[in-house]
Image (cartoon, coloured by chain):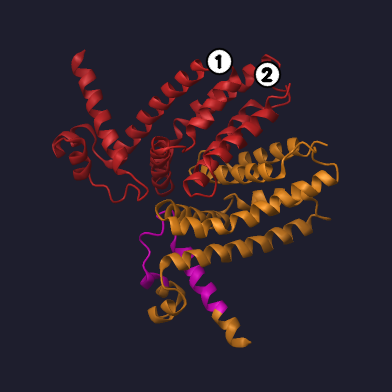
Chain colours: A red, B orange
Amino acid sequence: MPKQVDHEQRRVQIAEALQRLTTRAGLEGVSLRQVAAEAGLSMGSVQHYFRTKDEMLRYALEHRHKLRSERITAKVLAEGPPTPRSILRACLVEMLPRDPDSEADFLIGVAYFIRAVADPAMAKAFGEGMPELLAFFAGQVREAQQAGDVPASADPETEASLLWAIADSQGSEILMGHRTPAQAVSTVDYYLDRLFTP
Amino acid sequence: MPKQVDHEQRRVQIAEALQRLTTRAGLEGVSLRQVAAEAGLSMGSVQHYFRTKDEMLRYALEHRHKLRSERITAKVLAEGPPTPRSILRACLVEMLPRDPDSEADFLIGVAYFIRAVADPAMAKAFGEGMPELLAFFAGQVREAQQAGDVPASADPETEASLLWAIADSQGSEILMGHRTPAQAVSTVDYYLDRLFTP
């Protein structure tokens, strides 16, 4: 189905243009016209794929998640046989803004958060990916418990929320220059050291 | 010095007007004119105290922190002799948006965060209160270690960052309706249970 692939490529092209334009100044100043120009497409073509900036933003976020998953998988596999700890560590570290690329990723999340605070429909859409991610984290914790690497007393669902909180909050602190990426990574390792105490 | 007190009251009056106007829609739509009307003051009077919305926002944030500290102190003392654990718990729970008042407080923080992401000067100002707060948290952990209530292996500074992260990230999740206040409070207790393991 070459036609289908082409549509998908066009959406990615638009999402990436939006991401390049969404800097620290946020989404508010970005117009559909600018996105079209940045993507090298006509306004009509952009509007064929996305009706609103919010739709575009949502797609950009999903696209970013997909790329990140691929990067995490590649990274974990490159380190040798994956373990729950190496998988969780890679997920958390990958979420942190550590270089221009990961900062751009984090900023798309911030843009989404800003819209979600103002708009319950956006908040709902933003939240749709959360249960899946948290369930994945909880599953890794559970697997480590079965292997005897995490105490049976740990609650996998609460651990998943804590792991998310660490990367989420520290990512914001890095963005504001209150914390260095190295400090944030060392906090992630500190937390994992304590969690993975048989 | 009655004159001095009057100036301070005027600033509080303006800060509270700004806070009432800063809803989920954020600061962007709020004009100095609206703040003046909401505070029942003239534009000139507001401009005498604050040159920009950002100055006002900063003052509102400091004012909010002061009120929160007073509430936390009152709450902790009402529960009996304060302990590091009761103090830390009160600080974290008080940060979470649990009712319209604490939600308004959290939203002022979000408004500040949104500005700070776009503006390094705002980020720097926002970050000025952080070391003091983190040092306070670390001090409580250290005190608990000396009393034998927290393992000596815990690192007080890293614990302070983790405690902040839990309240910060979960507050955002509550705001977006992804998490209930009760779930967030129970996550705080879960974390403190593990930290306070002699």
Instruction: Count neighbours of disc 2 (C-alpha within 10 A) and say few if under 14, some if 14 to 19, many if 20 or more.
Output: many
Indicate which disc residue A145 carries: 2
* Labels 2, 1: one chain: yes
Residue A192 image position (x, y, % from top left): 64, 29
Name the main secondary structure of what is drawn in magenta: helix
Lateral position of residue B56 relative to residue B99, left or right: left
Q: Quadrant of the C terminus of chain A?
A: top right
Above/below status of A28 relative to A14:
below
Mark 1 secondary-structure assignment: loop
The answer to whether residue A165 of the structure is visible from this angle is: no
Q: Quadrant of residue A165?
A: top right
Lateral position of residue B8 relative to residue B140, left or right: left
**Residue lying at 42% horizontally and 35% vertically, measured from the top left:** A102
**Residue A27 is one of the magenta-drawn residues:** no
**Residue lying at 42% horizontally and 67% vertically, measured from the top left:** B53
Lateral position of residue A77 relative to residue A28, left or right: right
Q: Amino acid at mark 2?
A: Gln
**Residue B33 is one of the magenta-drawn residues:** yes
**Residue lying at 62% horizontally and 87% vertically, measured from the top left:** B2
Q: Quadrant of residue A110?
A: top left
Indicate which disc residue A82 carries: 1
The answer to whether residue B62 of the structure is visible from this angle is: yes
Tell me the chain of label 2. Answer: A
Tell me the chain of label 1. Answer: A
How many labels were placed on the picture?
2
Residue B61 image position (x, y, % from top left): 54, 62
Q: Which residues are magenta?
A: B8-35
- Closer to the camera in the image, B57 or B104: B57
Q: Amino acid at mark 1?
A: Pro
